[in-house]
Image: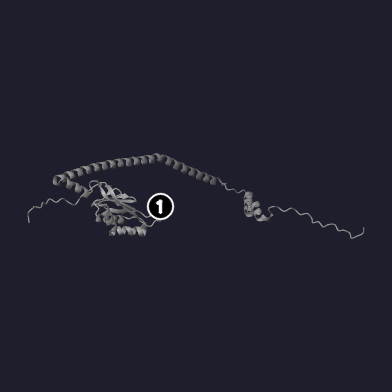
Amino acid sequence: MCGMPQQPPVRSSPTRPQRPDASMSLITNVMDHSLDDGYAEAAARKKSQGESGLPRTLRAKLGLAAGLVLAALVVTVGAAQTRAAAPVVAKERQELIDRIDSETAAADKLEGTVDTLRDEVGARQRAALKSTGGSTQADLVDVLSGATAVHGPGVKLVVNDAKEASSGGDGTNPRETSGFSDTGRVRDRDMQRVVNGLWESGAEAISINGQRLTALSAIRAAGDAILVDNRPLVPPYTVLAVGDGKKLSNGFQNSADGLYLHALEQNFGIRATISTEGDVRLPAAPSVIVRTAQPSTEKTEKGTS
């Protein structure tokens, strides 16, 4: 057949296959040449000149050896001193523990002696009062001075910090952190007003957390703790008062100090509850010591003008 001659198909010449990491040429170069060329050249030059990191002269070698020996000597001496001092430290620690135990036992013994003497003094006081005015007067003086335990109708007043102070949140004691405002804590002055309000409302005997109050009792603060006669108390503060329960409760809540406590509840979240009790029991005061007052020896004659 006659026709146009067919041209052979044009084929492209074969090319070398590309590397899979051709797109990462920079990373590949860094991996293949991890050492800078300048560092490699310097290392080769030192190697050709016979330089190395170790001293070559005898004097330098002796100095290095002396330094190593000195360092080993210091470490050895330090370890020997520590080992020799360990028994001495342990002995001193044990002596300190023994001394603490001995002083604690002595303090406990003295406290027992004080309790015994206090009971003896109380017994002699009651005997003296009975000899002068009868048992009724002695019992009355014991109650008024707080020298004896009492019980009777009265009120129970529980005062506690604000709710934020007792929750803690993170498990720590919020009273020891700076994040809790002082306005949410019950302070010593608050308890002073509570106690004074109960006395004014007709309470005959009062105790706070089991601590009996007397005419010589003091409510103070030491840091965040409230002290009653130098004994620290922890919230909640339970105040027991002996008296006419209903009259005592109403009188306190309507008094200036009761209104002050109510204002603390409304403004700062202080929690307080008061209830009338049929029988509350108060312990005796730890000690009643009079240093200034003396009994009067004057007698008034009857019938004199």
The quadrant in which residue 98 appears is top left
Q: Quadrant of the C terminus?
A: bottom left
Most extreme residue toward the right is 1
Q: Amino acid type of disc 1?
A: Ser
Can you see residue 152? yes
Most extreme residue toward the left is 304
The quadrant in which residue 194 appears is bottom left
Q: Position of residue 277 (x, y in %)?
A: 29, 50
SS for dot 1: helix
**Which of these two is toward me, 196 or 273?**
273
Q: Position of residue 215 (x, y in %)?
A: 23, 52
**Residue at 54% across, 47% down:** 60
Count of numbered tags: 1
- In the displayed structure image, the side of residue 138 where residue 112 appears, left or right: right
Q: Position of residue 38 (x, y in %)?
A: 63, 54
- In the displayed structure image, the side of residue 82 where residue 279 appears, left or right: left
Q: Quadrant of the N terminus?
A: bottom right
Question: Within 10 Å of the Cα at label 1, are there few (<14), some (14-19), or many (20+) other Cα atoms?
Answer: few
Can you see residue 192? no
- In the displayed structure image, the side of residue 120 where residue 158 appears, left or right: right
Q: Position of residue 132 (x, y in %)?
A: 13, 46
**Which of these two is toward me, 125 or 232?**
125
**Which of these two is toward me, 1 or 48?**
1
What colour scheme governs how the chains and residues are painted in the rendered image of this protein? Answer: one colour
Residue position marked by numbered label 1 in the rendering? 167
**Residue at 22% across, 43% down:** 119
